Amino acid sequence: MKKILISLLLANLALVSMSSVAAGADGETAAVAEISQKDRIMGAIMGVFIGDALGVGTHWYYDLDALKHDFGPWISDYHDPKLKSTGRFAKVHQFRHDQGVRAGDLSQTGQLYRMLIESIVDQGGYDRADFAARVDELFKTLNGKNYSGRYTDVAIRETWKNRKRGISWDDSKVGSNAITSDAAQMNVALAALFYNDPETLVKRANSHTKLFYQNAFPITHSVAYATVVGGLIDGVPLEHMAEHILGINRRILTRNAPYYDSRIQVEVGQSAWNPELRFSSPHLASKVYGQHCEIQQLLPGAYYFIHHYQYDFENAVLAAINGGGNNMARASLTGGLSGAMVGLSGIPDRFIKGLNDHEQLLKLAEQIADLTQS
């Protein structure tokens, strides 16, 4: 039944003219009307896990020829990190391999995301202090260096050091000054909880992001990303997403996401609807928007992929992966967005079953969804 539904969705979308997006939007909305909000919530939550796990084995190949050399012409599934990589970050790949990371495993960011979801389920809602206490437990297993855990990125290393200095989780200086996307990926869990209350979502996403970041630039992007995912779960069409975000109480929005252009960056993806601007090889959008770890490079690519591949989770996420660079974060961000659009029912089974501990992850996703439906 699922395959039939997806086939029908894609067939309907194929009839939509790229030169008349507005006219086609109503048809697309009707085509996905059967996707429930519970399905969208579970799709968004699982989409982040899937994108993260797809990238952990193929991470940080900035040379696409090296990526193809090590993994073939097109990555379409989970992979082990290479023991002998031809990429620039071969030492990272070997480290993860030596730590026992294998196909279907999560990165450290994925572990933190899972911890947040487990905290929400255990507490019956978002409890910042409870999650922070769980992060402290993880920090006890790390040494503050990059080659620690499953590899520790800069935002987590700097936050670890600030906690070691005794800085409180309630102090605005506890987080990093980095401009990466770890918190944005975690914010999908909050979007799932507060999708129907954008003002609360904005405030909670801001507060959560500040656990790991003190810089207003990544905070704005991370909060804005959460509002996009929340809007998609709530059924807001892509062409109206910026309008949806700007419709949030202005005082609350500007206080929690201060930079206007960053708040509506989702609009950059609409270039995919213009035949003169569309990439003939969509994964190369990552080369144009940027392959690096900064959130302002990652999000435009993710937004482009969900516009180019509306209601096509597989191709959206795989385009993010095959673009190289920080494909792990890009695919995770894309997975959260696309999962919110297609729902769990629109995600291919192999991506679900290929995740290690997928049955428990599905259970957690359903429990989050049930919290919002009660």
Image (cartoon, grey):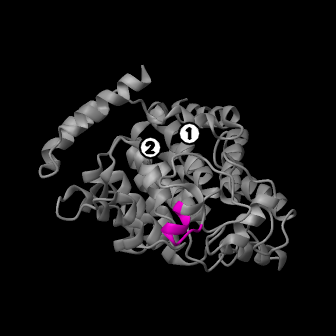
| Amino acid residing under circle 1 | Phe
Name the residue: 75% across, 73% down: 146
Check disc 1: other Cα within 10 Å, few if <14, some if 14-19, many if 20+. Answer: many
Dot 1 falls on a residue whose secondary structure is: helix
* Residue interval drawn in magenta: 60-68
Q: Position of residue 106 (x, y in %)?
A: 68, 51
Q: Quadrant of the N terminus?
A: top left
Q: Position of residue 130 (x, y in %)?
A: 75, 53
Q: Secondary structure at mark 2?
A: helix
Do the residues under discs 2 and 1 have CB atoms within 8 angstroms? yes
| The C terminus: image quadrant | top right
Judged left or right of residue 321, residue 231 is left
Q: Which residue is mark 1?
A: 351
At 48% from the left and 71% from the top, the residue drawn is 291
Q: Is residue 284 left or right of residue 352?
A: left
Asked if 259 appears above or below 365 in the picture, the reply is below
Report which quarter residue 183 is drawn in. Answer: bottom right
| Residue at the (53%, 72%) spot, across then down | 62
- Whether residue 261 is visible to the viewer of this picture, yes or no, is yes
Q: Which residue is mark 2?
A: 314
Name the foreground residue: 164 vs 372.
Answer: 164
Residue at (49% x, 49% y) in the render: 335
